[in-house]
Image (tube, rainbow, N blue to C red):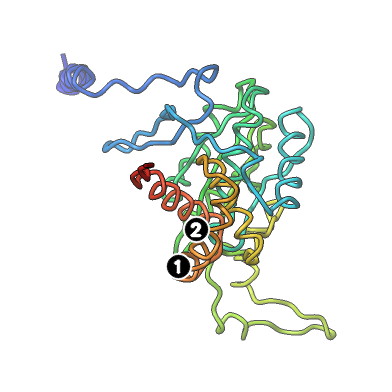
Amino acid sequence: MTDLARFLQRAERLLERIDTVLPVPPAAPDWRAAVACRWRKGANGRGWLQPVAKPHPIRLKDLKDIDDQKARVAANTRQFVAGLPANNVLLTGTRGCGKSSLIKALLNEYAKKGLRLIEVDKADLVDLPDIVDLVQDRPERFMIFCDDLSFEAGDATYKALKVVLDGSVAAPPDNVLIYATSNRRHLMPEYFSENLETHTVDDEIHPGEAIEEKVSLSERFGLWISFYPFSQDEYLDIVAHWLRHFGVADAAIAGAERDALNWALQRGSRSGRVAWQFAKDWAGMQAAKPAKRTK
């Protein structure tokens, strides 16, 4: 036996021993039971889909004063679930006004019709092609959910997202769409110096290459939906909804308006998230108060 043959034998025996101590890869999720999964990464860099035991229970009817946005995204999702043409979705705008909640509510609305959700952290976007490969032959319809998406200068992970959206030689699978939320319309920071690259040709404005690169990412989302700050009346309407959710009577809700406005003032925001937080705090304190004794 040659030295090379002996070396190969020893290498094979070593690999067999290593295989016995390596952790077993997690089993593929049962998509009939799991409606949502998170993409997880181990210390060895291996990724897997982890089922979410208790998905967020929020419903479309809980989302107040964003009727136009809700209707447009719900229509796109209905088309997707029905196997009709539908677009990748980018939800942008004011923080706390229902972007992420809308996506979670859509899952609850259409899960029984085959909709499934995979949440992917921005740091794991490089794994998107692998995630798509895992589900592209499944009969379910998958929303890949990227929350609070934005990229800093020099961040190359956005290129993996561009490829999955519309930049690969392979056709995107019919059963996968990207639903992302961001506080930035163009997902990447824009600098004043980049505007200096803009030039004109026959009186037409042509942005510089840096700006074109940044705009090209958000343009790969076929549907852009913008969210705006709530007015005072809209904010109080959302507060009232959540107080009713916690069992507070209408008469008590009217008396909570001043506290709700002060709560928003302290946080510098009249958003759905702030309204939800106030309602939990106020309803909890009212329930904790000792009952008045009657003579």
Left of 67 or right of it: where is 12?
A: left
14 to 154, vertically: above or below: above
Disc 2 and disc 1: Cα gap in Å?
8 Å
Q: Check disc 1 and report the residue beneath it.
A: 267
116 to 225, vertically: above or below: above
Residue at image coords 26%, 38%:
43
Residue at image coords 69%, 53%:
66
Give the amino acid type for the residue marked by disc 2 in the picture: Val
| Disc 1 residue crowd, few under 14, some 14–19, many 20+, Cα 10 Å | few
Q: Where's residue 95, x and y in %?
A: 54, 61
Give the amino acid type for the residue marked by disc 1 in the picture: Arg
For the N terminus, which image quadrant?
top left
Residue 274's disc is: 2
Q: Where's residue 290, x and y in %?
A: 33, 45
Which of these two is toward me, 286 or 223?
Answer: 286
Callout 2: helix, strand or loop? helix
For the C terminus, which image quadrant?
top left
